[in-house]
């Protein structure tokens, strides 16, 4: 079955098909795997999700990957991931996420990241993506703009 992305309106929502971790477990796994030296814990990220939603950020999920998003000018959207999947799972999930964004009328998606492995995953996809090394500080070494 194909992976489908969906909006998350309640952080305590029951798991859907293809999801093995609660959002809290996903946030903790992401921080432990990708940001173990960061000062913000997975529990703190999870606790911040309802606050983010209250200020208008939208959460999406596919499998064990979640995105926090907010709109940008000209039908764009900025996104940041919490991921507990391997590279193949992340790729599958992000393609489903981009399909959902496109169906909602977004024309591009923008993200910032530090890990060069993400650049490698983008380069192996069929996505129309522009990647720049910007050295913008912590969590902002690279900028990727995906045309949807």
Image: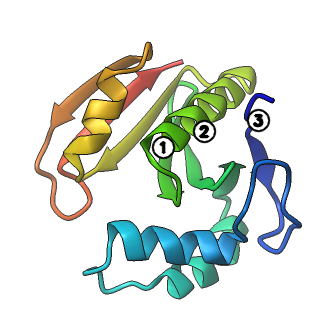
What percent of the width, then of the height, locates residue 122? 35, 28
Quadrant position of residue 105: top right
Q: Is residue 118 above or below residue 120?
A: below
Q: Which mark is residue 98?
A: none
Cα separation, mark 3 vs mark 2, equals 8 Å
- From the image, tell me which residue sits under label 3: 4
Q: Residues within 10 Å of mark 1 (few under 14, many from 20)?
A: some
Q: Is residue 83 above or below residue 119?
A: below
Q: Residues within 10 Å of mark 3 (few under 14, many from 20)?
A: some
Q: Are marks 2 and 1 in contact (CB under 8 Å)?
A: no
Cα separation, mark 1 vs mark 3, equals 20 Å
At mark 3, the secondary structure is loop
Q: Which mark is residue 93?
A: 2
User: Reading the chain from its start, which is encountered first: label 3 or label 2?
Assistant: 3
Q: Quadrant of the N terminus?
A: top right
Q: How is the image coloured?
A: rainbow
At mark 1, the secondary structure is strand
What percent of the width, then of the height, locates residue 99? 66, 24
Quadrant position of residue 92: top right
Number of the front mark, 1 or 3: 3
What percent of the width, then of the height, locates residue 8? 78, 56
User: Would residue 79 appear left or right of 110 to someone viewing this image?
Assistant: right
Q: Quadrant of the C terminus?
A: top right
User: Reading the chain from its start, which is encountered first: label 2 or label 1?
Assistant: 1
User: Would residue 50 appear left or right of 111 to someone viewing this image?
Assistant: right
User: Reading the chain from its start, which is encountered first: label 1 or label 3?
Assistant: 3
Residue for point 35% across, 32% down: 121
Q: Which mark is residue 78?
A: 1
At mark 2, the secondary structure is helix
User: Would residue 134 appear left or right of 98 to someone viewing this image?
Assistant: left
């Amino acid at each position: 079955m194909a992976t489908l992305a969906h909006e998350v309106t309640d952080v305590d929502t029951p798991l859907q098909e293809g999801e093995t971790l609660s959002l809290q477990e996903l946030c903790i796994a992401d921080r432990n795997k990708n940001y173990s030296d960061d000062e913000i814990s997975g529990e703190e990220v999870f606790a911040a999700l309802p606050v983010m939603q209250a200020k208008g950020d939208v959460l999406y999920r596919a499998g064990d990957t979640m995105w926090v998003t907010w709109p940008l000018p000209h039908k764009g959207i900025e996104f940041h991931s919490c991921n507990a999947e391997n590279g193949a799972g992340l790729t599958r999930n992000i393609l489903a996420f981009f399909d959902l964004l496109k169906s909602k009328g977004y024309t591009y998606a923008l993200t910032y990241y530090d890990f060069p492995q993400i650049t490698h995953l983008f380069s192996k996809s069929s996505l129309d993506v522009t990647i720049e090394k910007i050295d913008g500080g912590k969590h902002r070494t690279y900028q990727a703009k995906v045309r949807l």
